[in-house]
Image: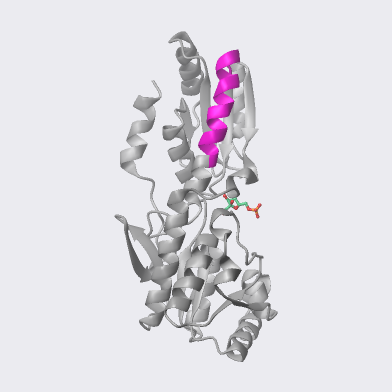
Amino acid sequence: MNACIRAVVRYGMAAGVDVLGIRRGFAGLINNDVIEMDSRAVGGIIRFGGTVLMSARALEFKTEAGQQRALETLNAWGVEGMVVIGGDGSLNGALALHEHGVPVIGVPASIDNDIGCTEMSIGVDTALNTILDAVDKIKDTASAHQRAFVIEVMGRSHGYLALMAGVAGGAELIVLPTSKIDQSVISKDVRAAFLRGKPHFIIIVAEGAKTENGETVTPIISRIIEEAGHEPRITVLGHVQRGGSPTAFDRLLGTRFGAAAVDRLLAGESGKMTCLQSDRIITVDLKEALGTTPQLRSDILRLAEPLAM
Ligand code: F6P
């Protein structure tokens, strides 16, 4: 997100625009937590994770009263256009502001890659690389001890990170939110893998893979491994996936999205979201993006099983 903020500030200033930063997201908009930005304010931030403007959950913004207070802040500062960077909640907030007449362009940022119409959101690639680094490290122990490891990754109800990390990380099994858990199949697979001479059995589980009671399937998978006669270990990667220095891909994506958002505002557009499609930055209606459920790539899905052999 810092790469995007930096691009909005510098590209906007180069176009003759005065740029403000709203701290702590919509909470800051409601509480007038606004700062003037210049090129020095964003110096050096491109290599840091998170956001220098900070973020917050703003339940009040979901109410009409909260949105009116936000509009008062925007009017007081004479704001003529906004770039809103974030996931589902932030982009829904962006749509609300657009519907109140504020020119807004949304930029998708969520490690879950669960925003419709864009192939990638900001943060996904960095999170994926963090997961791969962890999987590689875990494999050292797994191989030394011929163990099975159950590694749970983030992604909310979307299985993008699990699928991509599983294929790129050489997992023996990938459990997605849509996967059916069949004890006999998993037991057979884990036994067969070690008999084939595999030194480890790595299972990547999407946090969105849940039982009917809404509990994660991670402990269930671990129990299946144990009952199949192998010693499992569980690692829940958690919030390490959300931080760290962004990859080159993410820095460029954030930069391109930020500059495109400025261009679109200057062209008089509003209610749109920047998207990456076939390496081009385009915009679609925020409503369309928010109403589209992204699908996992079938060309990658079909690779998971044969490559685990
Ligand atoms: O949406 C991003 C995400 O990291 C999800 O993958 C995860 O389920 C959730 O946020 C964690 O949220 P919090 O930081 O509020 O615990």
Magenta segment includes 78: no
Q: Quadrant of the C terminus?
A: top left
Q: Main secondary structure of the magenta part?
A: helix
Q: Quadrant of residue 56?
A: bottom right
- Front residue of 177 and 2: 2
Identify which residue is drawn at 41% across, 69% down.
259
Task: Name above or below for residue 247 compared with residue 193.
Answer: below
- Stretch of the chain drawn in magenta: 130-147
Count of marks placed on residues: 0
Q: Position of residue 162 (x, y in %)?
A: 49, 39
- Front residue of 307 and 263: 263
Q: Position of residue 206 (x, y in %)?
A: 53, 40
Q: Position of residue 174 (x, y in %)?
A: 47, 32
Q: List the single residue furthest toward the right.
A: 31
Magenta segment includes 131: yes
Q: Position of residue 254 (x, y in %)?
A: 46, 60
Q: Is residue 127 left or right of residue 27?
A: left
